[in-house]
Image: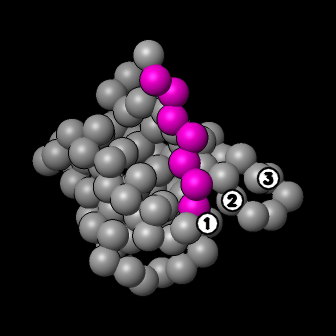
């Protein structure tokens, strides 16, 4: 499993409510943790797709970038702004 590898996952920042307003997501592990422990809702089609995409990426069945894109769609669905870096 590729839990903590960041080379395949382009970092992004989620803007959430609470004391830590900005959450950096730089690895598949952080994406999965964010979705399962810190997400404001536990339903929604994009949310469930992102959970599956992270799981599949951790097992090497889909790319980390596919999981990242699913996370961005889930954030949009939940009303969470996303800050990305463009190179």
Q: Which residues are magenta?
A: 80-86
User: Residue at 85% of width from left, 58% of height from top?
Assistant: 19
Query: Mark 3 or mark 1, which has the lower sequence index?
Result: 3
Looking at the image, the residue that sits furthest to the top is: 87
Tell me if label 2 and label 3 are in contact, CB under 8 Å: yes
Question: Is 41 in front, or is 84?
Answer: 84
**Residue under numbered circle 2:** 16
Is 21 placed left or right of 9 in the picture? right
Q: Which residue is mark 3?
A: 20
Rendered residue at 47%/50% (across/down): 31
Query: Looking at the image, do the residues carrying marks 3 and 1 touch, with CB atoms under 8 Å apart?
Result: no
- Tag 1's secondary structure? loop
Separation of disc 1 and disc 2 at Cα?
A: 9 Å
The stretch drawn in magenta includes residue 7: no
Q: Which residue bears the numbered disc 1?
A: 38
Q: Earlier in the sequence, mark 1 or mark 2?
A: 2
Q: Which residue lies most toward the left here?
A: 61
Q: Is residue 81 magenta?
A: yes
Instruction: Residue 10: give x, y in percent of width and height.
Output: 42, 30
Dot 3 crowding, Cα within 10 Å, few <14, some 14–19, many 20+: few
Say whether residue 1 is visible: no
């Amino acid at each position: 499993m590729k839990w903590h590898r960041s080379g395949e996952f382009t970092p992004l920042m989620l803007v959430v409510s609470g004391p830590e307003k900005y959450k950096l997501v730089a690895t598949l592990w952080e994406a999965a943790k964010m979705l399962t422990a810190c997400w404001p809702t536990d339903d929604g089609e994009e949310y469930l797709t992102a959970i599956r995409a992270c799981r599949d990426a951790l097992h090497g069945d889909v790319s980390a970038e596919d999981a990242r894109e699913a996370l961005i769609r889930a954030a949009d669905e939940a009303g969470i702004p996303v800050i990305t870096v463009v190179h």
